[in-house]
Amino acid sequence: MQSVRRPAAATAELSALARLGLTPAGAVWITLLVLIALVAVPVALGNQPYFLNVLTNTSALAFISLGVWVTFSIGRINIAQGAFAMIGGYTTAILSTRYGLSFWLCLPLSALIAAGVGALIGWPILRLRGVYFAMITLSLTEAVRLAFLNGGEFTQGATGIVNIPRPAGIDSPLAFYLFAVVLLLLGLLAVWRLSTSRIGWVFRSLRLNEELASSIGIDIARYRVLAFAFSCGLGGLGGAFFAAFLQNIYPASYSVIDSVNFMLYCFLGGLDFVLGPVVGAFVLVIGFEILHGLQQYQSLMYGVLMIGVILWLPNGILSLRLRTRAAAGSDAEVAASSDAAPGPTAR
Amino acid sequence: MSLLQVDDVSKRFGGLVAIDRVSFEVETGEIVSVIGPNGAGKSTLFKVITSFLKPTAGQVLFEGAPITGLQPHIVARRGVVRTFQESTIFKEMTALENVVVAHHLRVRAGTPGIYFATPTARADERRFQDSAAGILEYLGLGGVKHMPARNLPHGYLRALGIALALATEPRLLLLDEPFAGMNTEEKERAVEMVRGIRERGVTVLLVEHDMPSVMRISDRIVVLNFGRKIAEGGPDQIRRDPTVIEAYLGREDEELGA
């Protein structure tokens, strides 16, 4: 939103990036990330299905966490994402096994249904804030699990739904990996666009002060529901992916601990960055895999590391990057703010 | 027809009567002040007018239409916008970002348009950048517009709060204690600022403690005590009103700005 001064020659090229809310440095990073994910990883690990599956799994988990990040941006701690992944998963499971619908139709429908359910439930519960909202979303995860468990013929109860067909054209670990990564990149783009647009600024204003936001004419109820529905839609899409990837879904597929994990990925990655949940998911999931060698101490070590990150980096892993940039950029910033009036300086 | 009409408004909190059958009107282009000792119900009245609170009885009309019971953002859309007592701003944004966000009522693009950055949405944002910079300049905040709002000195925060309200292009601006905690020089500037706002065609209703400033700035004054309106009139009239003097409990005359 803040205009950035740049050399006049580069403006034509940059305007397209700026429209997306990208800085040139950001664009370089994103390009690098895309190249690693879509070229380097397949070349290096193309014939190692185990590692590919770990990465596929992590990418999809990161995708689902992106939604939780959106709810964080309006100042709400969302521990319901597992429920919406489950709703999306069951939508795809039921539509594809019972009605023979193509996965490529199930995928968007799962997102829409999850978003719709999210909007309906979100409308009343989003009045709550802080720990009250967190608690009710946590209960929601459990309530949805119980609903699917007791859904009778429709959901097949504890037996779950198995033999979900694979998406047409996606039949190898590598194909699933590429599908998951493309999905994650598109999700990142979608959330990035949201958070850099006015909608993202309105979300931030809600997080900072809802009363003030309503006093300047912002319909806070509407934007709260919009954020939550967007979040649930991402959860539903991710759930649909998992249903097709694992080819089964049970009421036990998503429990409270999964919802908590989705939230933790955001929290540990960094709430100030769209990439936060992605970094958080990869560091935590892959970190857990690496600790596999410790056998019975795996969970213990994992817990210790998690506490360490929260203590040393309360603003998330990505705040490391911000810190180094702030140190390097402070001189430039002083020069740039020379038009500021005499008075107290920013830092 | 009056711009604002407060019509027999009462507000009870349990057994406590915060406002008791208060009526008054504000005409277009006026500066009207609501004064009264602590606990007289000024802030409650303020919240009722901007629909942050629902009155127990009575109603508030803006341009002849009732605004009681509407949600605050709809009241703001009609043109009734308030500021807050404390330095209530979006602390994690810069001054400029604060004011750009506050242009929300003037967005012409729809939500999908904003998301996909259509030409209309981009034109909106360009307009808001210019307009926000203009408002900040006008209120003397031009030099600090890129500063994070949480780092602004206290005196600037109130001006920023007013900048947010002005960005909505209100018809009626309600200022909640705009002079509280200011020194003489700052009050001087703030009085000029409020007059300037009226020059821009905005009607001003303010709630204030500071008598000398109120006496200097107001066209009319409404005095509340224990939730009741005890007097209404021009500054000179109010200054001499025996009920008002008594309400202020035989305080020294200076306090009434004599």
Image: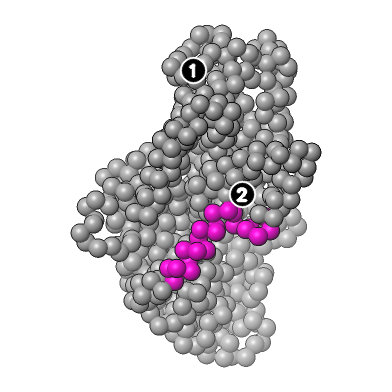
Which mark, residue A267? 2
Could you tell me which residue is drawn at 71 percent across and 45 percent down? A302
In the image, A327 versus B63, the foreground residue is A327
Q: Earlier in the sequence, mark 2 or mark 1?
A: 1
Residue B128 appears in view: yes
* Residue A317 is inside the magenta segment: yes
* Chain letter belonging to callout 2: A
What is the crowding at mark 2: few (fewer than 14 residues within 10 Å), some, or many (at least 20)? Answer: many
* Residue A178 is inside the magenta segment: no
Q: Residue furthest right?
A: A296
* Amino acid carrying mark 1 in the image: Asp
On the image, numbered disc 1 is attached to which residue? A171
> What secondary structure is the magenta-colored segment mainly?
helix
Residue A72 percent location from the top left of the image: 57, 47
Could you tell me which residue is drawn at 60 percent across and 71 percent down? B224
Q: Is residue A66 above or below residue A210?
A: above
* Chain letter belonging to callout 1: A
* Amino acid carrying mark 2 in the image: Phe
What is the crowding at mark 1: few (fewer than 14 residues within 10 Å), some, or many (at least 20)? Answer: few
Residue B74 appears in view: no
